[in-house]
Image: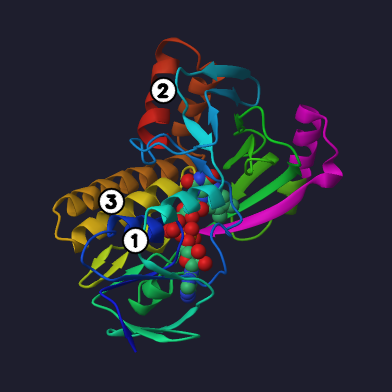
Amino acid sequence: MNDYDVVIIGSGPAGLSCARTLARSNLSVLVLEKNDQLGKKICSGEISPKVLPDEKFDRGHPWKSMVVGTDTTKHTVHFDHPYLWTIGRYEFESYLMSKTDADIHFSELVTEITNKYVKTDKAKYSYKYLVGADGSFSKVREFLSLPTKHIVGWAFHVVLDKPANEFHLYWLPKSFPKCYGYVMSKNRSKTMIGVATTGENFDHDFARRTKIWVENQFSLDTALLRSESMKGNADYRGWNFGNIFLVGDAGGFLNPLTTEGIYYAVKSGEGVAKHILGNSGGQKIMNKLVSTHKWQVLIFDLATNTKLPFCWIINWILQDPRKGVRRKIFDFVLWKLIA
Ligand SMILES: Cc1cc2nc3c(=O)[nH]c(=O)nc-3n(C[C@H](O)[C@H](O)[C@H](O)COP(=O)(O)OP(=O)(O)OC[C@H]3O[C@@H](n4cnc5c(N)ncnc54)[C@H](O)[C@@H]3O)c2cc1C
């Protein structure tokens, strides 16, 4: 048995953020990661400016304009500072890791959790505090007997082998209710063009309509369209369970509106680490995250309910979000709830 003060399961943004906030404390910290290296998650690495705003690191490509389209309109909206950056998962996680002094064990799958220790396929580790930073299918969450209602997302898109040079978002309530169309980076070197939706199963009619839309909008070869699915956890049910904590996707902090989760993972990792260190700022961070999350879930429920006039308000704003009241509302939502 190896003894640690804090054992963190998962070396994603949540686990690494927690580990780096605990750096230089007098606590011994271990991070256990089943993958053999960082950044293996197949997902885009878009981060908003609220991610570590005071730190200088290579954030990648800045996005300062956005093409916004509806069923019938298309406009470019400009900003004087970036609302998003394309950094890439590996680069971001490597930056976080460079700031930790924890022991990080790769290629160690956690197979068993008890109130006293964590067992992997290689060893057994006792803990005083356990942090579940193990993503949407968290074993720590399972140990706490918390159910999870996953958000299932489907993307049907073309992935081009070149960096994105534009960022587009389309709101298409007539042809694609509950979906959005996009052109955005997959990572620093690839571009995705297609439509995303939610639902338990892949919908073949959705695929047929996506083909037509992609062909008409972008004149691309639709034989290149591929489906990708994701299961995320926006089902928040608590973060503090005595000496066991849940952060990031394990805690359900994903923003269901945008599936943005990196910021919430980083911030919740920081909040829990401060709480473990006895710093009252930790509780404040977590209270704020929980309150923001509740708002996001409420807005997500409203926006995906096509029977509500809410959809038509969005449609009205996006028909020309460049000036006047529409621009004010557009900016408010973007900066307060998304970026
Ligand atoms: C397709 C897709 C695209 C996305 N794009 C973006 C984006 O552009 N911007 C954004 O902000 N968010 C995005 N997200 C959401 C974002 O990826 C997550 O919210 C974020 O990764 C959560 O970080 P985390 O540290 O909580 O979990 P994760 O990043 O999932 O990390 C969990 C870690 O735990 C490890 N682990 C799990 N189980 C065990 C175990 N039993 N033993 C040992 N290790 C284990 C995993 O290997 C993993 O490394 C996207 C999600 C998806 C699915």
Q: Earlier in the sequence, mark 2 or mark 3?
A: 3
Do tag 2 and tag 3 residues touch (Cβ < 8 Å)? no
Q: Is mark 1 within 8 Å of ligand 1?
A: no
Identity, as a three-letter code, of the amino acid under mark 2: Asp
In this view, 78 is above or below 147: above
Q: Which portion, as a residue range, is magenta?
A: 208-232
Can residue 279 be seen here? yes
**How many badges with numbers are in the image?**
3
Q: Earlier in the sequence, mark 2 or mark 1?
A: 1
Residue 133 included in the magenta stretch of the image = no
In this view, 106 is above or below 191: below
- Whole-angstrom CA distance, mark 1 to mark 3, is 21 Å
Q: Is mark 3 within 8 Å of ligand 1?
A: no
Of tags 1 and 3, the one toward the viewer is 1
Do tag 2 and tag 1 residues touch (Cβ < 8 Å)? no
**Residue pointed to by mark 2:** 331
Identity, as a three-letter code, of the amino acid under mark 3: Val
- Whole-angstrom CA distance, mark 2 to mark 3, is 23 Å
The crowd level at tag 1 (other Cα within 10 Å; few <14, some 14-19, many 20+) is: many
Can residue 259 be seen here? no
Residue 239's x, y, as percent? 28, 62
* Picture residue at 50% right of the left edge, 13% below the top: 322
Identity, as a three-letter code, of the amino acid under mark 1: Ala
**Residue pointed to by mark 1:** 19
Residue 160's x, y, as percent? 76, 40
Front-most of 198 and 283? 283
